[in-house]
Amino acid sequence: MWRTDEEIMINFILILVSYLIGALPFGLLVGKMAGADVRKEGSGNIGATNVSRVLGKKLGAVTLCCDVLKSYLPMFVAHILLSSQANAVLWVAACGLAAVVGHIFPVYLKFNGGKGVASALGMFLFLSPTAAGLALLCFLVAVWFSGFVSVGSLAAATVMPIMLWLNHEAATKITICLPVVALIWWKHKENIARLWRGEEKIWRKKE
């Protein structure tokens, strides 16, 4: 068994590694392999939505999967390593938060990263697949009726803590989701401004 000081050290190492994994700019890497710099095309974002717009839906899907996994997998590993700890849920959730923060503020790109939606999805999927599935359904409905991915992203992020609460998840999970929701809204501030002005790029034309 680890001593308390060893547990704390390992916990913080896991959080640091989760951040570094979350900071991996898969959208940029996928774009480079396809011969494009997604930071210079479309919206300039390195997330799956812009990759899909610039390079097509297949590469967008690849980016989406990578961004989801880079928060899910660190949490999965942390869950295994910390299963014997009484407060494992808190530390595992903290690893997910660190991965999302890494995606949004990647050290490799001078802390200028994506908007955190896909990496947040990976975190939410690990915390509660049921709640995440309902939030994803909310995303799809919002995009379908509005035509804007940003509207779907904001709607899904907003309802996630509510879905966790309705699913009777631990208060720790709900609490640690709140800064993720706040970060997603903050990263979408330009989208919100464009929506207000009627200048946001539409994903599909409404009927």
Image (cartoon, helix red, strand yellow):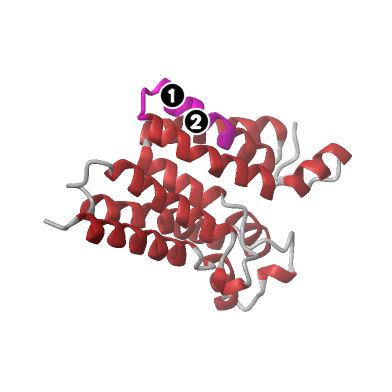
Residue 164 appears in the picture as rendered = yes
> Label 2 neighbourhood size at 10 Å, few (<14), some (14-19), many (20+)?
many
Is 51 located above or below residue 144 in the figure? Answer: below
Residue at 46% x, 40% y: name it.
176
Where disc 2 sits, the SS reads: helix
Instruction: State the quadrant of the C terminus.
Output: top right
Q: Amino acid at mark 2?
A: Pro
Q: Which mark is residue 161?
A: 2
**Residue in the foreground of this view, choosing between 141 and 120:** 120
Is residue 140 something that shows in the picture?
no
Residue 167: x percent and y percent? 38, 23
Dot 1, how many residues are within 10 Å of its Cα: few (below 14), some (14-19), or many (20+)?
Answer: some
Magenta highlight: main SS:
helix
Which of the numbered marks, if any, corresponds to residue 79?
A: none
Nearer to us in this view, 162 or 118:
162
In the image, taking residue 178 as reference, residue 167 lies left or right, namely left
User: What's the distance in space between the residues labelled 1 and 2, CA to CA?
Assistant: 6 Å
Q: Is residue 129 left or right of residue 137?
A: left
**Position in image of residue 140 (x %, y %):** 57, 35
Along the viewing direction, whichever of 131 and 169 lies nearer the viewer: 169
Residues under numbered marks 1 and 2 in contact, where contact means CB atoms less than 8 Å apart: yes
Region in magenta: 156-170
Q: Secondary structure at mark 1?
A: helix
Mark 1 residue type: Trp
- Mark 1 sits on what residue? 165
What residue is drawn where x is 37% and y is 35%? Answer: 128
